[in-house]
Image (tube, rainbow, N blue to C red):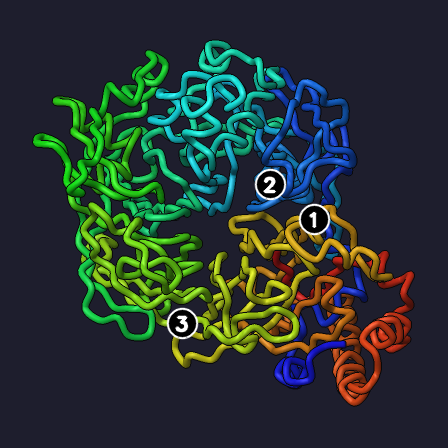
Amino acid sequence: MMHQRRRQALAATSIAGVCLGLGSVRAQSNAVVARTGSGSPVPFGQLTDKDGNAVLTNIVGGENNGAWNISDTSTATSVGVSHNPDWVTIFDAPNGTTSEKIGFVHLESPNPSSVYALAMRQAADGTLTVTNSEPVDFSSWGGTWILCAGSYSPWNTHLGGEEYEPDARYFQEAECLTSAECGDASLEVIDEDGFGSVVSMLRFFGIYANETTPMEQVKAVFDPYKYGYVIEVTPSSTTEGAGAKWYTSGRLSIELPYVMPNNQTMYVTDDGTNVGLFRVEMATPGDLSATTLYAAKLEQLSADNGGDFSMTWVELGSNTQEALTKAIDGGVVFSDLFETADVQESGDCPAGFTSINQGGDGQECVSLVEGQQDLAAYLEPRRLAAYLGATTEGSKWEGFVYDPFTKKAYTAISNVRYGMEDRQKKGADEPKYDAGGSNSIKLPYNKCGCVYALEFGEDFVANKFTAVLCGSPMPADEFGQECDVNSISSPDNISLLGKNILIGEDTDYHQNDFLWSWDPTTGELRRVGTTPYGSELTGVGLSRNLSGKYAYLTAVIQHPYGETDQDKLELPDATGQEGYVTAWPIAKADVASANFETVEQPISELEKAMPNFGAITTKSTDATSTVEQRAQAAETNLAAMQAEAEAKAKEEAKEEAAAVKEEAKAPATKSAGELASATVALVAAAGALLIA
């Protein structure tokens, strides 16, 4: 049974206006565009190799989050499917009618990662139906690597980021693949964190590695300098789209790229341990073929409430796509860019070497090879940033969005930890993450994370970085939650809806990930949704520049019952482990007016097993009668849910199992069978919203 205090905290307020949100996902299922493992000619999420063949796995039942460490993949017999969809975009289908659309969706993990193209047909009420599903061809780029979040470019293309880039230094130093073959000289030992991702990626090239796979074979096909970039998909005349990588973005652990309204400045967030913030300036607006790359340098002004910093920029170098392609195809390796030395017993570096700390592996001693700065700027930008004095102490740098109303950008730091602390690790003494670095950030540990605002000078160059919303740590409650449920925990996705900032969680410290709506002007924070057990809330976005009447709010549920709470699959209303993509039609007039309001929603034990999102309202009258009827149904349904939540709160004395069973049978909205079949449904007046 749900914790009484939490149930009360999640009590809903009344709805006003036209409901655009998911008054109950149970009422409608037409917002679900795609579920992993379904579709044709290629099932959505199926892993494919460079020749378009199915990638195999030895994990029965498809691949979920646990597929990173693959042992003896030579025994693989089952077709691999990723249940980890992430960023999604929707465009008009080229050469099609107004009712024909095309969507592009990241399948994040395991490797080989992919972008799927979904051809869709639009109904009169805005509902989208997938008519074709197949991966975008990135074979000429060596495939794609751990695709995470993304954005729409101002020139109307799909942008995304390759996360957790393979470490080129470790890869060059490795003498063999596995520890069984050469012990401490193996990639498995030298790069413990990245080893599984490399082995998974080898399947793209048809190599199902085992303990005897020679490193020469691996290095013949796999080049770490081909991964860790911004990717772009331009809708083409076919459903495959046109996929490309921009080496001119710099090679990082890219959460996402975000192009500012001037079409020339692009910010890139770097997701990991001891990371930075990067700025790409295009030589020509809207053209990434030639750029200059910068890294942020922070000066702490205050440690209060998540911190306050001034921000300046260190120029790393300039380069072109043509020159970088030539260098990578020519076989450049790490030692062409940097020389290295061991840290001395004194903690210092030998003469001629500079001490840096980046990427989470502690202190390094490096020396830039003469004449190679403009190449190192793009192939090793984080190392070069630290070398030149920029700040590489960030932790889990996630989403980013510009708000034209406040004229600020907002970005998420999922956990304030490690390099962001003062020679500590999660509050305990540990110098590793500051040793040999500048130790520019000295904040108290906050596992719940913060959202920060960036202020700008001329030409969208950020000069201020200030925490504006932080989660609140607390002692673990009976559900194991260690962040107050009335505030954020591990913020990840950041998106703009009207004048509100939407914040999606990726957390271990709330039992379920929440979706929040935050008003940066008033500071009002409302919990407007929750995801199923064990899932992550990702990929919230708003489509733009579509022909016809509708825009779309999109969202994705990633790996339900995957990271945690696998035992909850036994619940009668469990939705299963497939990931799914949703898209709510919204009248374009509402998007133009930016007149949205959000309303909190009750959360019961049933809703913890299913996606459940609060209402988004607008005063718009530009909606068809069908949409209005759906909105009224959603409002009625929400009222029933509120009554149900209040009634269940009075049953505190009952056993949890009995309460869950009773609630699953409750007839207030739909039967248990109907609820299971309508798992991710959505109601939309001029639209609705679900996130994952």
Q: Nearer the viewer, residue 405 or 614?
A: 614
Amino acid at pointer 2: Val
Q: Please tell me the numbered disc located at residue 469.
A: 3
Q: Residue furthest left?
A: 351
Q: Nearer the viewer, residue 416 or 686?
A: 416
Quadrant in which the C terminus is drawn: bottom right
Instruction: Work out whether residue 404 can be spotted.
Output: no
562 left or right, relative to 328: right
Amino acid at pointer 3: Leu
Locate residue 290: give its quadrant: top left
Callout 1 secondary element: strand
Cα distance in 3D space between marks 3 and 2: 30 Å
Q: Residue at x 20, y 31 (%)?
A: 366
Callout 3 secondary element: strand
596 left or right, relative to 608: left
Locate residue 268: give its quadrant: top left
Cα distance in 3D space between marks 3 and 1: 29 Å
Image location (x, y in percent) of residue 151: 47, 47
Is the residue 682 above or below the residue 251 in the image? below
Q: Please tell me the numbered disc located at residue 105.
A: 2
Image location (x, y in percent) of residue 313: 18, 49
Which mark is in front, 3 or 2? 3
Return the residue at label 1: 580
Crowd class of label 1 (few under 14; some 14 to 19; many from 20; radius 10 Å): many
Q: Residue furthest bottom?
A: 650
